[in-house]
Amino acid sequence: MIIVLRPDATEQEFQHIVEKIEEKGLKAHVSRGTERTIIGAIGDESVLRALPLEALPGVEKVMAVLKPYKLASRDFHPDDTIIRVRDVEIGGKEIVVAGGPCSVETGDTMIKTAQAVKAAGGKLLRGGAFKPRTSPYDFQGLGEEGLRLLAEARDATGLAIVTEVMETRTVELVSNYTDILQIGARNTQNFNLLKEVGQTNKPVLLKRGMSTTLKEFMLAAEYIMNEGNSNVILCERGIRTFETYTRNTLDISAVPILKYETHLPVWVDPSHAAGNWRWVNPLSRAAVAIGADGLLVEVHVDPENAWSDGAQSLCPVKFQSLMNDLKRIAETVGRTIAPEKE
Ligand code: PEP
Ligand code: MN
C-alpha cells in the first residue's frame, strides 16, 4: 500500500499515519521528497483494507499495490487455466462455441437444435430451464423438466450442456444434470449463490452483470474460487450504456483486459449483447479476433416461434455460416475452431 501525504501534512499527522500502519503489524517505509512525503506500508496489505486511511488527516491518496483478486489474477498464476468438460478443452487453443435456445422448450426442438449445433461444429449445448425474466408474466422456464430434456439432448448428441442456476437452493438439483453451471448477469454479485457454486465440482460460466465493473466481475470470480472451485469461465454479455440501438453494449475491451488480468478462459455472449440476430455474426467475429476463448450463442430451429429471445436467435443455417466465418478468423489469430461441415 502506498500512501501519498498532502503537501501541507503536519509532522503530527505523519506520525499518526505511521502509528496506524505499525499498529497493524506492517512496516512504514518513509520516502521524503522535496514536495511530498510518501509512506509505503510493507507487509500483508489486506489487513489495512479495513482502515479508512484515505480519510486520515494529512492523506491525499492511497494506492493498493496488490490486486484484490488474488486467485483469479495472473500475478499469482501466470499460465492460462484450461477447463476440461467431457472431451472439450476450454481455454486452450481451440475456440469453443456453445449454441442452443434461450429457454429449453420441447424435447423435439431441443434435440433438433442440438443436432444442428453439433453439425455446425458447436461443442456445447446451452438452454435455460430456470429463466431470469424481467417480467413475472413471461415464461419462467420448465424447471426440472427442462433439465431432463437438456440431459436427453446430451445423451442423443454427446454435446456437454450448460444451463443457468438462479438460486442457492437449486444448485444441487441443477448440478445433478448439467456439465457447466451458468450464473446469469442478474446474479453476478449474488454472493451467496457464488459461494454455493464454488462448493460444487462443476465448472462455472460466470456472466458479467449489466452494470458490473471489470474489477467487480473479477472479484465475483474470486468468490467462487475462494470456495475451492477454480474452474471459472468469465463471460462478457454486454453492459448497459446510454445506447439503446442494441439490447446491451458489448464491451469488447473486456476480453483483452480480462485475459491480461486473469488466467481464466474468457467468453463472449454476442446474443444478449446484440438483442437482434443481425449483429450476432459481426460481434462474434470481433470477439474471436480480439482473443475470446469461446462464445455462447443463442440458436433455435424456429426463431420466429421461440418462447424467449427469438429476435436474437440464429437459425441453423445462420449458425452454420457463422461457424464458417469464425473458422477463417480463428486461423488468422492462431486458434482453431471445429471443422466446418465437409
Ligand atoms: C442466458 O444466457 O440465458 C441469459 C439469461 O443471459 P444473461 O444472464 O446474460 O442475461
Ligand atoms: Mn436469452
Image (tube, grey):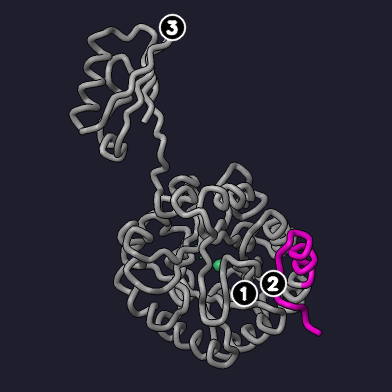
Mark 1 to mark 2 CA distance (whole Å): 9 Å
x and y, in percent, of residue 93 in the image: 65, 67
Q: Is residue 280 above or below residue 245?
A: below
The residue identified by callout 2 is 314
Residue ID at (57%, 47%): 257
Position of the N terminus, as image quadrant, is top left
Left or right side of 252 for 330: right
Q: Are the two marked residues, 1 and 2, in contact with CB atoms closer than 8 angstroms? A: yes
Residue ID at (32%, 62%): 227
Q: Residues within 10 Å of mark 2 (few under 14, many from 20)?
A: many
Span highlighted in magenta in the image? 324-342
Q: Is residue 337 above or below residue 37?
A: below
x and y, in percent, of residue 15 in the image: 23, 15
Label 2 vs 3, first from the N-terminus: 3
Residue ID at (38%, 74%): 201
| Type of amino acid under label 3 | Thr
Image mark for residue 99 = 1
The residue identified by callout 3 is 34
Residue 327 drawn in magenta: yes
The residue closer to the viewer here, 114 or 21, is: 21
Left or right side of 122 for 165: left
| Type of amino acid under label 1 | Gly
Mark 2 vs ligand 2: CB under 8 Å? no
Name the quadrant where ligand 2 sits.
bottom right
Is residue 278 visible in the rendered image? The answer is no
